[in-house]
Image: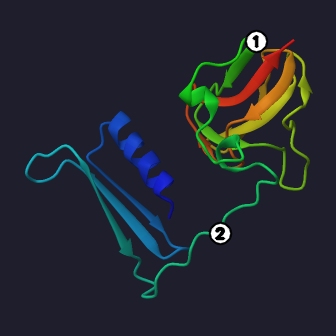
Amino acid sequence: MEIKLIHHLARIMKRADLTELEVDDAQAGLRVHLVRGSREGQGAPLVHVMQGPASHAPAPAAPQPHYGAQPQYGSETGERPRAATSELPPGVVAFKSPMVGTFYRSASPDSDPYVEVGSRVKDDSVLCIIEAMKVMNEIKSEYSGVIVEMLVQNAEPVEFGQPLFLIQKT
């Protein structure tokens, strides 16, 4: 289970003002139990990762999906996206997620991605799909321009307002 997922669950707990959350992954044989605040009143979340009842062997590492040539975080060095760390160059805008959900680059696993770095987009061009509550929502560009950087990996959870793409406006 990825640490990113645990951090995401902790954020959900904080936003929803939950004190306890348990996730049971039967396929991996793991159960994650998060508790916000301890019995002594400390505010830090506690995380308990326990072996599931079906398996006594260590859980296998989760398979890493193949994202084509896209390096993690959208750069060859693996560093955080520019939109999250510094000012953007003139004419470049961050296209942000209009909703919470799961980001997909294409309509299906067999389809080509809607856009790649270097793709030209127009107003209302489909950039990606965000799945929210089992509904696939086509996300359309608000700008005409060229995709400069992709800031999100395929099948990654996204937050409302999270930058997805950098677009050089034309």
Q: Is residue 47 left or right of residue 87?
A: left
Picture residue at 50% right of the left edge, 78% below the top: 59
Helix, strand or loop at label 1? It is loop
Q: Is residue 92 visible?
A: yes
Picture residue at 33% right of the left edge, 61% below the top: 33
- Where is residue 58? Give x, y as percent: 46, 83
Establish if 23 lies above or below 15. below
How far is mark 2 from mark 1, CA to CA? 38 Å
- Where is residue 57? Give x, y as percent: 46, 87
Picture residue at 60% right of the left edge, 43% below the top: 79
Q: Which mark is residue 63?
A: 2
- Where is residue 104? Give x, y as percent: 74, 44
Establish if 150 lies above or below 30. above
Establish if 18 lies above or below 99. below
Q: Is residue 109 left or right of residue 81?
A: right
Picture residue at 56% right of the left edge, 29% below the top: 84
Instruction: Please state which of residues 58 and 89 is positioned toward the viewer in this rendering.
Output: 89
Crowding around mark 2 (Cα neighbors within 10 Å: few <14, some 14 to 19, many 20+) is few
The residue most toward the bottom is 56
- Where is residue 170? Give x, y as percent: 87, 11
Amino acid on which the number 2 mark rests in the picture: Pro
Q: Provide the residue designation for mark 1.
A: 91
Amino acid on which the number 1 mark rests in the picture: Gly
Q: Quadrant of residue 126?
A: top right
Q: Is residue 82 left or right of residue 91?
A: left
Establish if 10 lies above or below 65. above
